Image (spheres, helix red, strand yellow):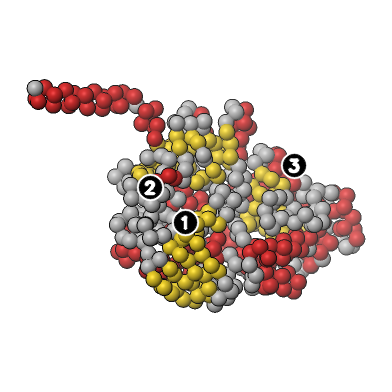
Amino acid sequence: MKKKLGMSLLTGVVVLAMLFAMAGPAMAAKDTLRVGWSVPARKWNPHLNTAVMLLGHLEPVYEGLVGEGPKGELLPRLATKWEQTKDSITFTLRDDVVFHDGTKFDANAVKANIADVQSGRYPPNAKKLIAISSVEVIDATHIRFHLNRPAPSLLYTLQRFAGLMVSPAALKSNSVDKVPVGTGPWKLDPKRTISGTKYVYTLNKEYWDPSVQGVAEIEINVLSVEQQFNGFASGELEVAGLHSAFVPRAKAAGYKILSPEGPHEALHIYDRTGKIVPELADPRIRRALSYAIDRKAFARVVLQGNSIPSTQRYLPGSQWHSEEIEDLSYNLKKAKELMAEAGVKGFTFDTYSQDAFFDMMNEPIAGMLKKIGVTMNIKSIPIGQLFVAASSGKYAASIMPLIERHPYDFYQAKLAPDAFMNPFKYEDKEIDALAKKAARMDEKSAAPLWTEMSRLAAERGYLIHIGSVHFAIMVSKRAKNVKGRSFSPYNIFFRGVTVE
């Protein structure tokens, strides 16, 4: 009797296995989120990364002390709370977290991670933590960062690359260079991952918050933009990036499209002193450039509607958006009047482009400026040299993305006298005073000052804003609770997503 029962159970298991196999992808995908992406993972140590396109590969496996909401909100994560003063930030840490390799997460682990970033192996991230002069381990669940300067944007920095926590054991052995070892809800499965093609993440059964693990597996497939669209249309993907060229087809098909705020494009005026192009020293000329740009047409025609036109850095809904800003929107008559008032019939300035995407933006803007007698001479530069060119002092202006999320970082990168993208060292004492004062205040009190700084920078024409480019994401009806991630092209939050 026992033998027959055993055979019966075995037969049942085999039959179930056969049914699952016969069901194929549809049944296998029930608890798998399948994603189409354009970029492969490069470096698994987040401390050696700054490319926001790669956040999607890091999101399942890593998390920081500070979490991030869809609009960049500060949320508790590995730290349950924090207190910031002008001299320090003190964190209270979770006491129930382990890394994927079994290493305990505690204050010493945090200290090891900050040391790894500050070691200087990757200067862009090391610089982001320059305000931390020392790290004090109070006890296992409390740690204090001592600050040597104002750090109003440090908590936002800790949400991403420089603040993501890696197992100290993996850092020491350099094993993280091959396989990510974080504390996140999912783990990379190296055996099922095909580098450069497909990345498979499986459930972290030791994760401290099972409520966010809505799917057992995440599968990220690296595909061309056309393959992503076709894969989504055929039902092979639950989530996929949507290139602007395919937006009309996606809308016509009635697909659900997410459009989180993306990088903000602007014509940066570097030569505010008029050193190489004297006309640009006149604020009337810089405002004329703003009036000459038809942002709505640019968004509609060039970006297929996948953009929000704007004459200032922060969009409506942001705590730093200004309602008092001068109307700098398209007005060709006013642009020509300002040129005449300044006694300028026309002039030429050099700018640069590195690929088809920048050509797509530069050429229409050049056509618009031509209508007021301004020639924007576009020169080709090698791929990867955008920021080198911006800081070189060889170019009077260029269209570049604003990737800084917090106004303090915006000031430090674009407006400060020693800013990386202020190669002619132009100094605006009023903006400098606002920034220095705001940097020493709490976030709520500082907000009006940051708003005023942003308004002045736009009205004085240091940056001629064009708008926020949205990198759209298609989401199938099967995928629920999918949220886009601001300032992160095509990235979503995996936490809480389910598949029906």
The disc label shown at residue 232, or none: none
Q: Is residue 465 visible?
A: yes
User: Which of the two discs, 1 and 2, sits closer to the camera?
Assistant: 1
Residue drawn at point x = 38 percent, y = 40 percent: 217
The disc label shown at residue 297, or none: 3
The N terminus, quarter of image: top left
| Residue 72 coordinates in the image, percent (x, y) | 57, 54
The disc label shown at residue 186, or none: 2
Answer with mark 3 or mark 2, whichever residue precedes in sequence.
2
Residue on which the image places disc 1: 77
Q: CA distance from mark 1 to mark 2?
A: 15 Å
395 sits to left or right of 30: right
Q: CA distance from mark 3 to mark 2?
A: 43 Å
The C terminus, quarter of image: top left
The quadrant where residue 298 appears? top right
User: Which of the two discs, 3 and 2, sits closer to the camera?
Assistant: 2
Say few, some or many: other residues with alpha carbon within 10 Å of mark 2 (under 14 / 14 to 19 / 20 or more): many
Front-lying residue, 411 or 195: 411
Residue type indicated by callout 3: Ala
